[in-house]
Amino acid sequence: MSGPVKTDSDNSDSKNGKNPTSGGDVNAPSTTAAYYEKGSAELATESALTLAKIQHRLKLTKKNERLVLVLVGLPGRGKSFIARKLQSFLTWRGSDCKVFNVGKYRRHAAEGACDANFFDTKNSAASNLREKVASLALEDMLKWLDEPFENDANGNGAPSFRKDRVGIFDATNSTKARRDWVLRECTDVVKRAGKTTGVVFVESICDDEELLRENYRTKMSNSPDYKDVDPEKAMADLLDRVKKYEEAYETIDDDSKSYIKIFNLSSKILVNHIYGRMAKSIVPALMAWNIGTRPVFICRAGQTMNEFDRATLNCRLSRGENLGEHGKNFRDELFNFMRDECLDFMRRRREKIAFSPNLNTGTSISGLVNQFSRDVSESGHDVDEEYVGADGITPLPFPCYIMTSTMPRARQTVEWENYPYPVEMLSNLNPLDKGDFTGQELEESAEENPEWYSRLVGDPFHTRFPGGECYADLMSRLESIVVDIEQQVGPVLVVSHVSVL
């Protein structure tokens, strides 16, 4: 029997890593492999078409000093809740923000509350008044947006900084004609010459009947329109008002506009032409907000070693110091306090769940609250009794989402024995970086650099420490922390430092 004969040349090609049949290198990448290894660099070349497609994006990505957020939605959809949350969040992050509620203007013009007939489209007198008060509110908002910026501390007339100004136009804005009018008034090239203003529509849509009923009850108990009104009559009037709005309501469907649609208070979000700071800051915040109540605790890290301990151990003062004796005592007391507070929260939640099971839907980022509830239910224990977790061994003292800085003293403040849940250590929560002035008291820094201190007094928010941060930088890195806190549905504990808290 004969077979293939192995020649010297065959052996040589094999040793050299070549494919004897193709004559190629077996280690060389194939054409397909080379395509994937190169990635998409060749596909990223510019063309007339791609440049045309990104023109609108380039326009929207530009950061305007003035921004208008126009709320859209039927009554009872949480528009005012969203407006207040936006105002609080944007003010915290350093923007000038103000809500212009058209309902407030309407009550003033109508000299009191208005019943459902006032919102009937067939009521021409009421329709004219509604248009008038909307115009007044919009005019006031644009005047506020155009007010001069603050001058610097030197009094030379030049602005020391330019903060963003965000006006929130809080109304139903339920028709396409109304929204087009708002957009024209805010962006008219003649009226608004030199006052570039961005406009984004935020529509709140709710089709969850249980959530709607809860929203209606909240609106009835808080709206001036229903003060001292019998609850049954108030509900009937509100439902009639909603029905009249629904007859003329037009959802946003014009994709040439920038808009955000929020479904059932952030269970789903749809965005169109949203870039830059809107995508980076406002959209994550809108996604995080929920109507649930939960306690949020902020706590300074425990005390480090005192001077006597430091001298005894020959340790110098540093950012990496450990807890001292007082700090350890504080850590133990903090555990007892958090346990009592969190178990009380869970007890109150369980009482509500007894008649409203849907209150326990949803989860936090760690899923602790629902896991805790399931553990309690399955074990048959009351929340006051000690019980074990899913592994059947580890004690579960209480559910809490805990975040600390990376400083040892902060982490050690929550080093509790038998606490099974993870603790997030985040550099975002580290103290303000004072650069060259680290470890100094402010008086020492002022004496060392009086010129810098003068700038700090004039603009404490934007003046950076030499080689370090300013408070605006601190706010920027804390933004994701705030969003993380907002999205939780159970207790939260943040352990950080004076400059952060």
Image: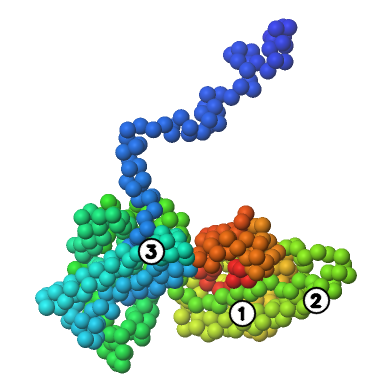
Q: Which mark is residue 271?
A: none
Residue, far right: 312
**Residue 244 can be seen in this image:** no
Left or right for 364, reference 233: right
**Foreground disc of the pair 1, 3:** 3
Left or right for 268, reference 409: left
Separation of marks 3 and 2 at Cα, in angstroms: 50 Å
Q: Nearer the viewer, residue 184 or 227?
A: 184
Disc 1 on helix, strand or loop? helix
Instruction: Kindly identify the amino acid type of the residue bearing the numbered disc 1.
Output: Cys
The quadrant the N terminus occupies is top right
Give coordinates of residue 50: x percent, y percent. Answer: 35, 36
Name which of mark 1 and mark 3 comes first in the sequence.
3
**Foreground disc of the pair 3, 2:** 3
Instruction: Kindly identify the amino acid type of the residue bearing the numbered disc 3.
Output: Phe
Residue of label 2: 325
Give coordinates of residue 30: x percent, y percent. Answer: 56, 24
Residue of label 1: 342
Residue of label 3: 149
Disc 3 on helix, strand or loop? loop
Name which of mark 3 and mark 2 comes first in the sequence.
3
Give coordinates of residue 455: x percent, y percent. Answer: 53, 62
Determine whether label 1 and label 3 are within 8 Å by CB.
Answer: no
